[in-house]
Amino acid sequence: METMSSTPVHRRKPALSNPRVQRTRTRILAVARDLLPEVGPTGLTYALLAERADVTRQTLYRHWPGRAALLFDLILEGPDSGTYPEPGSDVRAVATAWLKSLRAGISDPAIRTAVLAVTAQADHDPDSAQALVRIGEDRHAALNKLLEPSGVQINDDEYTMLYGPVLARLFLDRGQVTDAFIDAVVTQWLTALHHAGA
């Protein structure tokens, strides 16, 4: 394994603990978030992003070796919509708040575009496929963390049954996810959980 001092500068990973590196990364992600809805995923080239963020392409490649890694971070480090729920013992309340948070996140044009791009590329691009899996694992783990006080932990199928209808409504039906729709999804999901536990 190479040490930091023996690794050429252009191949070194950025030290995220460095405040200057973190500010640069935050600025790049903000610029990418602004550009993505305007130019789309294929138009978000590293040349354009480097120019708009006032960094070198080398800096971009050091942070994100490929577009899938950049889109992954755009999705998971999206803007704070202020609606992420707190852990709780009421499974219905936690699930409802979590779905509303999902709805708010996907409503952000950059996140919506990034999710669609990663999903579309997953069949043909191993990096996108891996990013999609990692996003699912991250969100599943986050939901289980919120559910810890209730004593309920959900498996992969139960997780998919909760978020699946919301994404289907947004991306396939191109419809609105109303509070009433979320309430209906959570009610059906809780019924399925109850039958599975019986």
Image (cartoon, grey):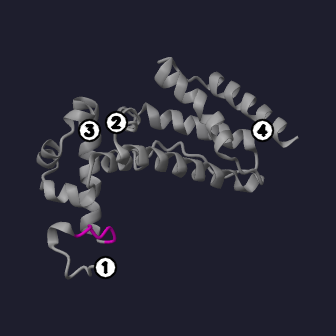
At 70% across and 32% down in the image, what residue appears? 186
Front tag of 2 and 4: 4
Within-10-Å neighbours for mark 3: few <14, some 14–19, many 20+: few
Numbered badge on residue 110: 2
Whether residue 24 is situated above or below residue 78 in the rendered picture: below
Q: Nearer the viewer, mark 2 or mark 1?
A: 1
- Residue positioned 17% across, 46% down in the render: 46
Quadrant assignment for the N terminus: bottom left
Q: Amino acid at mark 3?
A: Asp
Residue 80: where, in percent of width, then height? Answer: 44, 46
Image quadrant in which you'd find residue 160: top right
For the residue marked with disc 1, what is the amino acid?
Answer: Met
Magenta residues (range): 12-17
Q: Quadrant of residue 8?
A: bottom left
Going from N to C along the chain, the mark reached first, 2 or 3, is: 3
Residue, disc 3 = 34
Tell me if mark 2 has few (under 14), some (14-19) or many (20+) residues whose alpha carbon lies within 10 angstroms of its own.
Answer: many
- Considering the whole magenta stretch, tell me its main secondary structure: loop
Q: Residues within 10 Å of mark 4 (few under 14, many from 20)?
A: some
| Residue 188 point in image, percent of width and height | 74, 28
